Image (cartoon, rainbow, N blue to C red):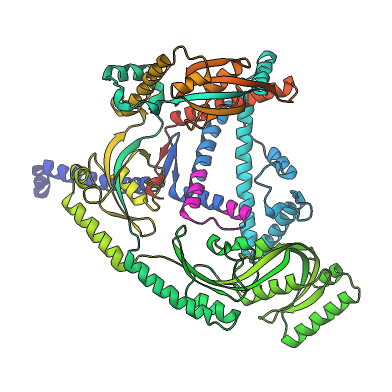
Amino acid sequence: MAALGRIRKHGVLLVACIAIALFLFVAGDLFRGGEGWLQESKQKVGEINGKSISIQEYQSLIDEFQSYYEIVNGTNPSGEEQLNQIKDEAWQTYVQSQLIEKECEELGLTVTDQEIREIIQSGASDMLRVPLFMNQQTGQYDYALVQGFLNEYKKLQESGSQIPDAYTKTYKYYMFAQKQIRSQALVRKYQTLLAKSLVSNSIEAKRHFEERTNESDVILASIPFTSIDDSKVKVSDDEIKDYYNKNKEQYYQLLESRDIKYIDVVVTADENDKLEAEKNMEEAYKLLLNAKNNTAAGNVCRQQTSASQFTDILKRKDAYPMMLASLLDSVAVGETVKPQYDQLSGTYYTFRLLDRQTEADSVLYRQIIVPVQDAEASQKTADSILNAIKAGSKFAEVAKKFNQPSDSIWLSTVQYQTMESNPDNELFIKTLFSMGDGESKVLKMTNGMNVILQVLQKKNPVTKYNVASIIKPLNFSEKTYTNVYNKFSSFLAKNNTLEKIEANAEKSGYLLQTSPDIIANQHTIGGIPNTREAIKWVFDNAKENQVSELFRCGNSDHFVVVALTGVNKKGYRTVEKAKDIIKHQVMDEKKAETIIADLKGVKSIDAAVAKGALIDSLNHISFQAPAFVRSTNTSEPLVSALASKTKKDQFAGPIKGTSGVYMLYVTNKTKTEDKLDLKQEKAIVSQSRLGAAFQTLINTLYMKADVVDNRYKFF
């Protein structure tokens, strides 16, 4: 009872302790759940209609597109620009498919498995017209190849055998192609539905035909807006506001953007670096000059780490860098050219012309590879095969005995001149291209393998060259790099605000550049490679007028510092934000009024010239094809419209265009030889409308979908 009394006495405290314990228990779960959510959000690349895509999913998409280009082009995509294009294509394809799928789901539009099978069987998709599925003899898509591969792949799976990498890669591509074919088919269905609302009629089709087939030749007189100095045109704030209100839709932006200023310091070789490079090239030249044979010359190139790989084979002129190729016909065989500097590529070079020959550009051949046995047995087998072929045995039947294909193969110079340098490749090419039509030969490779070669046809004799070259870029030294870095760092230490940088950059020899409206998914600032970290800083951490740290960019040859000057939110840009753009647009309108007033009474090209007009001759322009005006470097649809309604030998204008005021004299009227086909013309009109309508629709869906693009955080 005493214990019970003590519990009652401290009841409130006990309840409080229990409550706190329960709270901590629940809060712990909440914290762990929140931690998981936070981790998940960090892995989110983007979001469309509330559906997120993770970094892993996006990387998988990139890998699929990368494999596609590798299969189509035969080489791996390389370089920052190529890879960025693939990343963008993967994202844009994904976004569009998500937008369209949502619409189609609501409309009940689907693509059946049977439809996919029909597309694959007929080859009615670019995704299928790749070398893997093309018949080498016909050059056409062959469904039998697809079937054969899938059956073979299934057998390997069922047998539990190790599946070769090439098979796995091909199967992954096939599955990717299926997915893309389904998505493309759904888009086509949606477009077909949309096209039904964009019909044309006979009257409109006939007018469209007349507008594109009636052409005019004109003499055009142009007075560019740039002929009037901006300082002479005054634009008030009220005029800017009035223009904004009338044209507000022009200032809607789909994506949030940033305005920045930046300094880009490029590290280049100084005079000491040049002297050192010239000294090294002179030593390399002497070594190449004294090389006794091709092998020795190749060794010199490799020892000197030449930027151009040496292969001891004949190549076409276009295989060599331009500065070498331009000299190949003026250099004697055996001659070594003294070191020179190429300003365009920024490289020093020297080379020896080892050989120059006229040789077939392409060879059609077939081969049988003798299985690797001991050297004597392999040689005997190879000799017996060759003797059998020379005695009249059919090549295909002999190849079949050794379970090898007997298909003929074309090998061109372009194909082999980019091959990896190794003795077997060089021996194979030299042997093959030196053989005569119809000749068969045993080729013993350096690895002991024997190959029976038979040349069927050689064609297109061309001049080829064998060159040993030493090419070295002019690089800056570590000392130069350090000097540039220290100097720029010292400047930034003294000028650590945007205001100070603006005041002192030019005096210190630095160019402060402006870049308005950069968006998060662009890959570079000012076209400078590897500026992703700077872009991340701009969008993640920066505050207006803040100056960044010093970024090392490019190929370790750029120092970049960035300052954020403005944030432009998604949606309608304010008058203040659009002020500079609007000011120039209003200026152009005022300039046009001034120019047109000055041209009052001008009724001929000569009179227009007297007023300072520039003259162009434009031929075959039509209402449907906007005229490109060289004098203003602009495409001007209104010039085409004016020409189409002006009769021959008549003068017309002035009219305000995009970049100037224009007058014209029609010298001739012609009609193309096209014949009116109303059905075809209606289709042309509808198709042109469909393209514009579909893009407008995608933009509208994009705005509705609240698309979030955070790729800049990862790539």
The residue depicted at 78 percent of the width and 66 percent of the height is 365
Q: Specify the segment rendered in magenta.
A: 67-89
Q: Position of residue 345 (x, y in %)?
A: 47, 59
Inspect the magenta stretch and tell me whether residue 464 lies in it: no
> Where on the picture, by quarter, is residue 710?
top left
- Observer-nearest of 596 and 318: 596
Is 629 rendered above or below residue 477? above
- Observer-nearest of 525 and 482: 482
Q: Residue furthest top?
A: 601
Q: Position of residue 367 (x, y in %)?
A: 77, 70
The residue depicted at 45 percent of the width and 33 percent of the height is 49
Q: Position of residue 519 (x, y in %)?
A: 38, 39
The residue depicted at 79 percent of the width and 80 percent of the height is 382
Q: Is residue 219 left or right of residue 684?
A: left
Inspect the magenta stretch and tell me whether residue 68 lies in it: yes
Can you see residue 29?
no
Q: Position of residue 321 (x, y in %)?
A: 55, 62
The residue depicted at 56 percent of the width and 81 percent of the height is 296
Can you see residue 539?
yes
Is 528 rendered above or below residue 251? below
Q: Residue furthest right?
A: 392
Is 432 rendered above or below residue 104? below
The main secondary structure of the magenta stretch is helix
- Observer-nearest of 638 and 545: 638
Q: Is residue 571 left or right of residue 337?
A: left
Q: Is residue 105 left or right of residue 460?
A: left
Q: How many marks?
A: 0
Q: Is residue 151 left or right of residue 323?
A: right
- Observer-nearest of 546 and 230: 230
